[in-house]
Amino acid sequence: MSNEAECCSSIRILSSILVIFILVGGIFVLMYLRLPQPTDQSVSSSQASASHDLHTAWMSDIRSILSDLSASTSPADIDKMRDKVLALRVAGSDRDTHLQLVLLLGDMERGDVAAFGKIESILGSLE
């Protein structure tokens, strides 16, 4: 019986060790899954570069489109300018300014004299 007792005792010890290894392995797997994944710096820098390029192109296009704008520009010409402005792609950082310009062009088209001064002010503040 002592052989049987030793055998049962050995099996219990091996079973306990096996359970411990499984638990420790499970903990390591869970820790690995919770670690933040490294980000690809080249992707974020290329997105920033694309956003900057879009911003630069937008500013250049806005200045070009609105270069002939004056307080005496006809409503038909203002409408054409507004359509060109609306067709531009806009970076997220320029959305508010873009919307202001579109709305002010609409105001000018409807005869609001003060809108031209506001547009000039916005164009003067563009970097």
Image: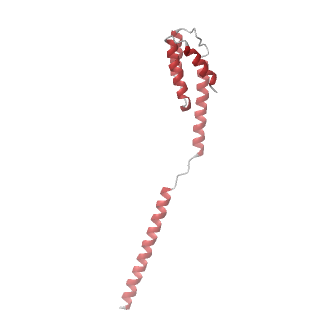
Quadrant position of residue 74: top right
In depth, the one of 123 and 37 nearer the eye is 123
- What's the residue at 51%, 24% (across, down)? 99
Type of colouring:
secondary structure
Spot occupied by residue 16 in the image (x, y as percentages of width and height) = 42, 76
Q: Residue furthest left?
A: 1
Q: Is residue 125 above or below residue 79?
A: below
- Quadrant in which residue 123 is drawn: top right
Is residue 65 in view? Answer: no
Q: Residue furthest bottom?
A: 1
Quadrant of image for the N terminus: bottom left
Q: Residue at x 47, y 66 (%)?
A: 25
Position in image of residue 118 (x %, y %): 57, 18
Q: Residue at x 51, y 20 (%)?
A: 102
- Where residue 113 sits in the image (x, y, percent)? 55, 12
Q: Nearer the viewer, residue 32 or 116?
A: 116
Q: Is residue 21 above or below residue 32?
A: below
- Would you say residue 103 is visible in this rendering? yes
Q: How far across and how far down the image is residue 45, in percent? A: 60, 40
Q: Which quarter of the rendering shows the C terminus? A: top right
